[in-house]
Amino acid sequence: MAEAIRHDKTSRQLRMLSDALDSGRLGPVRRLVNTLSPAEIGNLLESLPPAKRAVVWGLVDPEDDGEVLVHVGDEVRESLLADMDPDEIIAAVEDLDIDDLADLVEDLPDTVIDEVLKSMDRENRDRLEQVLSYPENTAGRLMNPDVVTVRADTTVDVVLRFLRLRGELPEHTDHLYVVSRRRQLLGWVALQNLVTHHPNTPISRLIDDSLTAIRVDESAESVARQFSDHDWVSAPVVDSTNELLGRITIDDVVDIIRGQAEHQALGAAGLDEDEDLFSPVARATRRRALWLGVNLATAFLASWVIGRFEGTLERIVALAVLMPIVASMGGVAGTQTLTLMVRGLATGQVGTGNLRALLTKEVSVGLLNGAAWAIVVGIVSALWFSDAPLGLVIAGAMAINLFVAALAGVLVPLTLRRLNIDPALAGGVVLTTVTDVIGFLSFLGLATLVLLR
């Protein structure tokens, strides 16, 4: 429900913007844009064709430029940065949090990166270099080194006075981290405990050490899973010696989850989640041509299998009419299993500990569905063509293909993962090839054996 409301709101804003831009009235556009959050502005910019996008981008409050750049895809960000001069870029990114700046800095021109680094104080420059030293899609790259730490041998009153002197807290601060003299993490103290306990209460009595901190080399998927499991707002990040390096907040995790969902949805079609909706025709054509070529190769393989039974098809024309049914049913059944597997692998729910049980379950489902729909299709085909043996042939082929589809739906993504190939990207193509080839081979092979004896 909330997602539908958000989509309706975006659609309404987009329509209003387009109408105002078409009429040449920039005043209403400016007022609308500056009532939106940076994330909403980024979403609208991604929804606009390049010419209108450039006009709207020019109307965004310069103070929001950096945050908006964080909330758009790589291709859109590249196009927006191309229209900015170096001074504008430096002004846009200088107030960003370290983790957000780390997301942007590698997309900036080299000359601008040098100027950005020069504009930062030594502490923040060291923090940025530290974050950039970690691989992408790891906790180290996601974390913000700006954390508030306290010592266990202080009291609530001392900590509260320290916070008042500090003046402000980083966004999404719900805990303060308790560290030793060497910054080893001892635990954390909830802000609510600080304001509800007596000023003389020692911090050591309020420490919560029940939760495990996130290791700096953990994957982004693992981070998102832990936040989901524990309902965290923020979590500390430590190295192998338990030294506190920074923290990850819920806003970063929401971005991870959204990115995973977009990757699974678009990856199944061979598309990139960072691709601009209005990317240049030549660029989009080149990208899509690759997967069209792969699909063509697999289609030729299926056609070759059909060609091996040319004589059978010439003698029994009904086979050509019924043949797509077997392949289509296998494709749908396999895709159902594949989708569950890709999701399970992404969330860590599928592993060696439950693989045998999962395979048994999916194969059982494939056998039961195969038997049920084989009976239905067999009866319909026998009545349609007044040919009982033909009904038996398609029923047998249907049962075989749904069984193989279930088996492939489990094994294909596991095999691709072992080969370091993204199952969300390549799984659909491989699975379709398997179900098409097995479907045609079983149907035409059984027809040759049974009907042409």
Image (cartoon, rainbow, N blue to C red):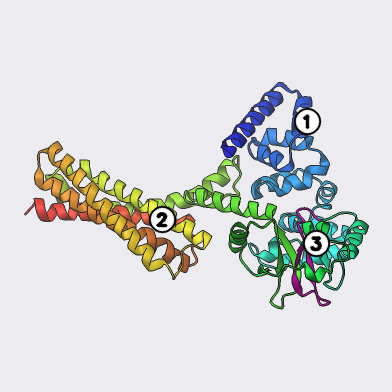
Question: Mark 1 packing: few (<14 Cα in 10 Å), some, or many (20+)?
Answer: some
Tell me the SS state at disc 2. Answer: helix
> CA–CA distance between discs 3 and 2?
41 Å
| Residue type indicated by callout 3 | Asp
Question: Mark 3 packing: few (<14 Cα in 10 Å), some, or many (20+)?
Answer: some
Residue drawn 81% across and 77% down? 182
Residue drawn 33% across and 63% down? 360
Question: Mark 2 packing: few (<14 Cα in 10 Å), some, or many (20+)?
Answer: many
Where does the image place residue 283, in percent across and percent down from the top left?
Answer: 57, 46
Q: Which residues are magenta?
A: 170-189
Q: Read off the residue under disc 2.
A: 338
Tell me the SS state at disc 1. Answer: helix
Where does the image place residue 419, in percent across and percent down from the top left?
Answer: 46, 68
Of residue 417 and residue 56, the one placed in the foreground of this image is 417
Farthest residue, direction front:
198
Image vertical order of residue 216 relative to residue 95, above or below: below
Q: Read off the residue under disc 3.
A: 146
